[in-house]
């Protein structure tokens, strides 16, 4: 809840008789308008004792309220209201005194009465707006503060509060407009410019985001401002520039999790996965409970073929954010890729419970997983092996294939390049094969293969063969 801190009402300075008289009422009001409250109070008290002056009572209420003498303030303001029920100023100070005494409901009622009398009293508008914020009535608060702007009485805090209310409603364009108005009223500093940049990103205005964060960097070239500019450039899809700024931010603040995360993602988009890897890893160390960070790291590992590690990160994301449907889909897909069929089917069942509207597509996916599981079980019973195959008659190619396999080259790529077998275009995938159907020495060699293992070059009937077991 926001604290209710109101400044002296502007309206009171224009009320009362003209200055220059010698009587205590005129003198007290003159001193009050001059903000000499210590000298004004004795004169105003004499005035109140001898003259039924609503203006004097309101001034006394204001002085007592500002001095935290809420009981006196309440008494003076109530007497002023009795004398003049149409006095907005009297009802304002009565509401303020009641608020100081903890009676928020009655304070609100007095201010509502004042609002019906006048819609341009700044203290009343602010007070009701802050009460509305505390009550969770953000739409009402927004309207009251907007009225302050319309009447030309808004200050920097008014625009900042409007920006906050708009942000709560995810009205990013309005929040940005109000924030820029606040900077116009109060001036620009690095922190306010960074906030403007962040709001501009959320509003989809990347031009303003880059412009604002560049100004912030020009004022203070710190890790924080550089990170803000990097995020703005990232949002504008200017990835190379973003990577440069974010790297500088990480160099200055190596343990800033947000900068590490953004840098890792930019590098990933630039196909610089090797550079992205340590930044993803460090981010997860620093922010282990960040579901999105875990998920993105999992996607990175998946792209690099590290499926077991990828699954661990995605499962962590699902535990942290069970409603993150994208993570649940990727988890099911990874389980399928790892041939953990029953777990994959169970993961799809969970998706069906969360998204029954997608039951047709999910049902087809589940049926496919079950069919593959059953096929795998049948192949295992029959002793069938899923193999990739390269065959060539060129001995020079045999030596090159062997060297590239030892260096870690992808078998399917080599099959496409060198094999003249009928499945070369499919990366040499010959499907499930019974070793018994192969001639020696091919039969014995494939029988002894482990999953993901590759044979040395094998000669049979004048041709050279390489095999890799997929499953």
Image (tube, rainbow, N blue to C red):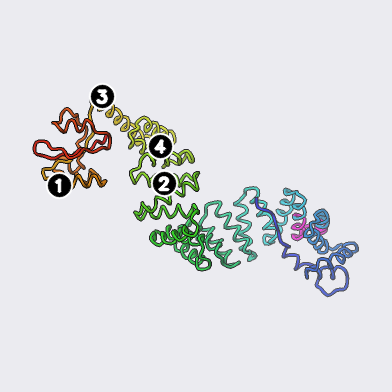
- Nearer the observer: mark 3 or 4; the answer is 3
* 397, 94: nearer the viewer: 397
* 318, 80: nearer the viewer: 318
Q: What residue is pinned by disc 1?
A: 397
Query: Of label 1 and label 2, which has the lower sequence position?
Result: 2
Report the magenta residues as a range: 79-95
The answer for how far apart the CA atoms under marks 1 and 3 are is: 36 Å
Residue 470, image x, y percentages: 26, 36
Quadrant (top left/top right/bottom left/bottom right) for the C terminus: top left
What residue lies at 88% left-to-right and 71% top-to-bottom?
Answer: 23
- Nearer the observer: mark 4 or 1; the answer is 1
The answer for how far apart the CA atoms under marks 2 and 4 are is: 29 Å
Q: What residue is pinned by disc 2?
A: 297
Q: Helix, strand or loop at disc 4?
A: helix
Mark 3 surroundings within 10 Å by alpha-carbon count, few (fewer than 14), some (14 through 19), many (20 or more): few
Say whether marks 1 and 3 touch (CB < 8 Å). Answer: no
Query: Of label 3 and label 4, which has the lower sequence position?
Result: 4
The answer for how far apart the CA atoms under marks 3 and 4 are is: 38 Å
Q: What residue is pinned by disc 3?
A: 381
- Nearer the observer: mark 1 or 2; the answer is 1
Residue 66, image x, y percentages: 77, 60
């Amino acid at each position: 809840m926001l604290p209710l801190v109101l400044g002296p009402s502007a309206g009171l300075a224009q009320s009362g008789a003209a200055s220059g008289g010698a009587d205590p009422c005129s003198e007290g009001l003159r001193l009050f308008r001059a903000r000499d409250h210590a000298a004004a109070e004795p004169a105003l008290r004499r005035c109140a004792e001898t003259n039924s002056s609503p203006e004097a009572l309101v001034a006394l209420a204001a002085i007592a309220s500002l001095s935290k003498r809420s009981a006196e303030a309440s008494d003076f303001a109530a007497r002023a209201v009795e004398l003049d029920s149409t006095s907005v100023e009297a009802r304002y100070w009565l509401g303020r005194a009641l608020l100081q005494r903890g009676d928020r409901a009655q304070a609100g009622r007095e201010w509502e009465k004042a609002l019906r009398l006048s819609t341009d009293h700044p203290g009343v508008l602010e007070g009701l707006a802050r009460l509305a914020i505390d009550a969770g009535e953000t739409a009402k608060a927004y309207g009251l503060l907007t009225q302050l702007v319309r009447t030309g009485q808004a200050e920097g805090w008014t625009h900042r509060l409007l920006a906050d209310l708009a942000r709560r409603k995810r009205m990013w364009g309005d929040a940005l407009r109000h924030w820029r108005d606040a900077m116009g009223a109060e001036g620009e500093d690095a922190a306010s410019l960074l906030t403007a940049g962040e709001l501009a990103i959320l509003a989809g205005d990347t031009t303003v985001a880059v412009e604002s964060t560049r100004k912030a960097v020009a004022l203070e070239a710190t890790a924080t401002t550089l990170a803000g500019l990097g995020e703005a450039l990232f949002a504008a899809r200017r990835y190379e520039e973003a990577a440069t700024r974010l790297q500088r931010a990480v160099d200055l603040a190596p343990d800033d999790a947000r900068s590490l995360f953004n840098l890792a993602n930019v590098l990933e988009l630039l196909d610089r996965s090797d550079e992205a890897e340590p930044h993803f890893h460090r981010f997860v160390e620093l922010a282990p409970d960040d579901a999105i960070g875990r998920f993105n790291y999992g996607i990175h590992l998946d792209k690099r073929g590290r499926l077991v590690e990828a699954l661990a990160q995605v499962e962590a994301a699902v535990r942290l954010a069970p409603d993150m449907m994208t993570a649940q889909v990727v988890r099911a897909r990874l389980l399928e890729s790892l041939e953990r069929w029953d777990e994959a089917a169970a993961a799809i069942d969970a998706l069906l419970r969360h998204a029954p509207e997608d039951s047709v597509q999910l049902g087809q996916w589940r049926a496919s997983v079950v069919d593959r599981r059953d096929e795998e079980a049948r192949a295992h019973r029959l002793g069938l092996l899923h193999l990739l195959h390269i065959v060539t008659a060129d001995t020079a190619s045999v030596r090159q294939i062997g060297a590239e396999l030892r260096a870690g080259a992808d078998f399917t790529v080599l099959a496409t390049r060198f094999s003249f077998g009928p499945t070369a275009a499919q990366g040499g995938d010959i499907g499930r094969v019974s070793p018994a159907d192969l001639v020696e020495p091919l039969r014995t060699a494939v029988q002894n293969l482990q999953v993901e293992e590759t044979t040395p070059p094998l000669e049979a009937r004048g041709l050279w063969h390489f095999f890799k077991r997929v499953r």
